[in-house]
């Protein structure tokens, strides 16, 4: 049952059909499926396919926009059914690092953190290291999420962490990295606190970091 509904959510996004996405989302709720899982395994996977089609030039901007509308419509239905903390667990500053304009995965992370009760400050894509540091200082964020989908932009993550240290902010914020080219080992190499494979995993990693349950030793 769940796989069938997840498939409907994926296809609704891929086809850019808002009404179908809403109907499938309501079906997921009626079936008692986990709302977070429905977003990640259904709507988000659909957007991942759309992103790939766009990169392959099988889809153009018009199709991507229609798909994003369908994604957002489905999320709107499911979001209210995600269990949230009674008290906000923290403040998240989020963005795709300098030199990288991919933001589909990052956007999903932002939506999920917001639904989980976090105060989210999404800086967008192609964000300069200085902008991340400034926002962390301004918001007193305790979580910083850095996304990269290109190997050429990965070094920007290291630069952000270096600047946080130079500005005396490193100890006050947990840094989580994500994206296709990065890994737990890379997180260790650059001195990040955690690595996440998807939005749901990122929330779990954030919670465990804030509870001091994860320690990533910096690799030599």
Image: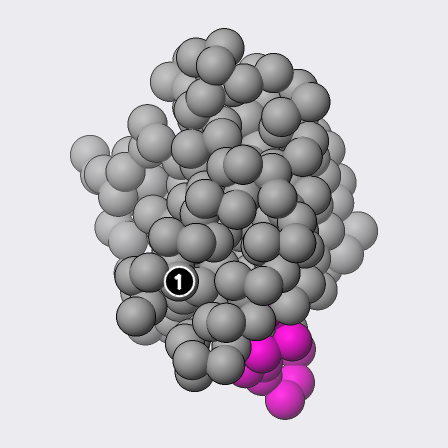
Q: Give the residue displayed 50% in from the left and 72% down from the top.
A: 27
- Relative image position of residue 123 (x, y in whole percent): 71, 39
Tell which of 173 and 33 is nearer to you: 33
The quadrant of the picture occupied by the C terminus is top left
Specify few, some or many for label 1: CA neighbours under 10 Å numbering under 14, 14-19, or 20 or more. many
Left or right of residue 220, residue 93 in this image: right
The residue depicted at 55 percent of the width and 26 percent of the height is 102
The residue labelled by disc 1 is 5
Q: Which residues are magenta?
A: 78-92
Give the image location of residue 31, x and y in percent.
42, 80
Residue 183 seen in the figure: yes
Q: Quadrant of residue 115?
A: bottom right
Magenta span: predominant SS is: loop
Say which quadrant the N terminus sits in: bottom left
**Residue 186, image quadrant:** top left
**Residue situated furthest left in the rendering:** 220
Q: Is residue 100 visible?
A: no
Q: Is residue 76 magenta?
A: no
Q: Is residue 69 above or below residue 156?
A: below
Please tell me in which quadrant of the rendered image residue 32 appears. bottom left
Image check: 83 left or right of 130?
left
Residue 79: say if magenta: yes
- Name which residue lies at 66% across and 19% down: 61
Q: Residue 166: where, in percent of width, then height? A: 59, 37
- In this view, the residue farthest toward the bottom is 86
């Amino acid at each position: 049952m769940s796989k069938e509904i997840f498939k409907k959510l994926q296809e609704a996004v891929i086809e850019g059909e808002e009404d179908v996405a809403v109907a499938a989302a309501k079906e997921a709720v009626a079936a008692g499926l986990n709302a977070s899982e429905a977003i990640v395994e259904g709507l988000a996977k659909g957007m991942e396919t759309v992103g790939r089609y766009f990169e392959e030039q099988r889809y153009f901007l018009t199709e991507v926009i229609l798909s994003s509308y369908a994604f957002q419509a489905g999320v709107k239905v499911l979001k209210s059914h995600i269990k949230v903390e009674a008290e906000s667990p923290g403040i998240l500053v989020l963005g795709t690092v300098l030199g990288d304009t991919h933001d589909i995965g990052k956007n999903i992370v932002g939506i999920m953190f917001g639904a989980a009760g976090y105060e989210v400050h999404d800086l967008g894509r192609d964000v300069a290291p200085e902008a991340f540091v400034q926002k962390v200082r301004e918001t007193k964020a305790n979580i910083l999420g850095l996304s990269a989908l290109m190997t050429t932009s990965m070094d920007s993550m290291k630069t952000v962490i270096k600047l946080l240290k130079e500005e005396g902010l490193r100890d006050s914020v947990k840094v989580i990295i994500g994206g296709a080219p990065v890994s737990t080992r890379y997180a260790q190499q650059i001195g990040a606190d955690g690595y996440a494979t998807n939005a749901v995993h990122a929330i779990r990693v954030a919670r465990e970091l804030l509870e001091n349950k994860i320690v990533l030793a910096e690799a030599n």
